[in-house]
Image (cartoon, helix red, strand yellow):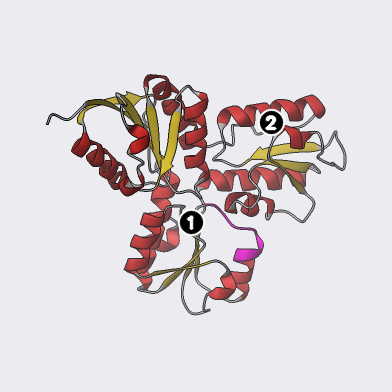
Amino acid sequence: MPKPPLTLYLAAPRGFCAGVDRAIKIVEMALEKWGAPVFVRHEIVHNKFVVDSLRDKGAVFVEELEDCPDDRPVIFSAHGVPKAVPAEAAKREMIYVDATCPLVSKVHIEAARHHDNGLQIIMIGHEGHPETIGTMGQLPDGEVLLVETVADVAHVDVRDPDKLAFVTQTTLSVDDTADIVAALTARFPNIVGPHKEDICYATTNRQEAVKAMAPRCDAMLVVGAPNSSNSRRLVEVGRKAGCGYAQLVQRAPDIDWRALEGIGSIGITAGASAPEELITEVIDAFRERFDVTVEMVETAVENVEFKVPRVLRVPA
């Protein structure tokens, strides 16, 4: 019986970004340099497949620094950590490597600079997300206020409406963030924004590719983890851009084939912490069931690369 035809639109860019690539490399190089076990505070990136493969190589994932012994190296995740964490590691004379994405570190530096200039900071982000915790933890309590939605802006209680700055989580929806920024500038006309957009290039590029792809698709799948902020934003962007069925899947076995019955086209993309092999696995699953024609939807070319910390580049 012939397979039904299917046009598969493949977003580009998709999957790993430079910060994720660097963070994974840091764990692998630390294992090579110091041997197993190497401890990692929090999931290095939000992807179970990646975390499990590093665990198999000898990485031990813990939630807090207190769960790490003093005599083994510890790595801080790509999302960034509050200032108190490296301070505690230094106090305990631990070997530690900071895998914070340089674009998240840029936001930390920005927040500190605003604070030094006497400004209170409003952070646009998701409560409880490790990146938000890390950024807010760069400064003393009360110096960074969190808003998640446009509605939150009306209720935020600031010290001085003329001495404010804002920063954002790097993995937010570009459009939703623009609405929150507009609400902030309407309420606080003198609020200071970032010199350059805080939402990182990879988040922006992946959302732009989804916007270009979504109107052509009967359905769309985002390969990524449920705790990955940028992956969940891609699903939302796809729905808003006109794709009626957009879902997050971690791997091919998660695909709901009944929901996809009768489709003629599907869009595939992946969050910034999803490896290409999982995307290939999903495409192969469609090839088993459909006569697939792949069309690339490319909206940007990425060639960003971040160096690993010097401690890993010098011999032990």
Amino acid type at mark 1:
Ala
Q: Is residue 296 above or below residue 30?
A: above
Which region is colored magenta?
Answer: 79-86
The outermost residue toward the left is 1
Q: Quadrant of residue 121?
A: top right
Q: Does the segment drawn in magenta span residue 80?
A: yes
Q: Residue at x 54, y 52 (%)?
A: 79
Q: Quadrant of the C terminus?
A: bottom left
Q: Is residue 228 above or below residue 2?
A: below
Q: Residue at x 43, y 30 (%)?
A: 245
Q: Is residue 103 left or right of residue 192?
A: left
Q: Quadrant of the N terminus?
A: top left
What element does badge 1 sit on? Answer: loop
Q: Residue at x 42, y 45 (%)?
A: 224
Q: Position of residue 115 (x, y in %)?
A: 76, 46
Amino acid type at mark 2:
Ile
Name the residue beneath numbered marker 1. Answer: 99
Chain-order first, disc 2 or disc 1: 1
Q: Is residue 10 left or right of residue 147?
A: left
Q: Is residue 126 above or below residue 195?
A: below
Mark 2 burial class by Cα count in 10 Å: few <14, some 14-19, many 20+: some
Name the residue beneath numbered marker 2. Answer: 180
Q: Quadrant of residue 60?
A: bottom left
Magenta highlight: main SS = loop
145 vs 101, nearest the viewer? 145
User: Is residue 189 visible from the viewing direction of this image?
Assistant: no
Q: Is residue 170 left or right of residue 245?
A: right
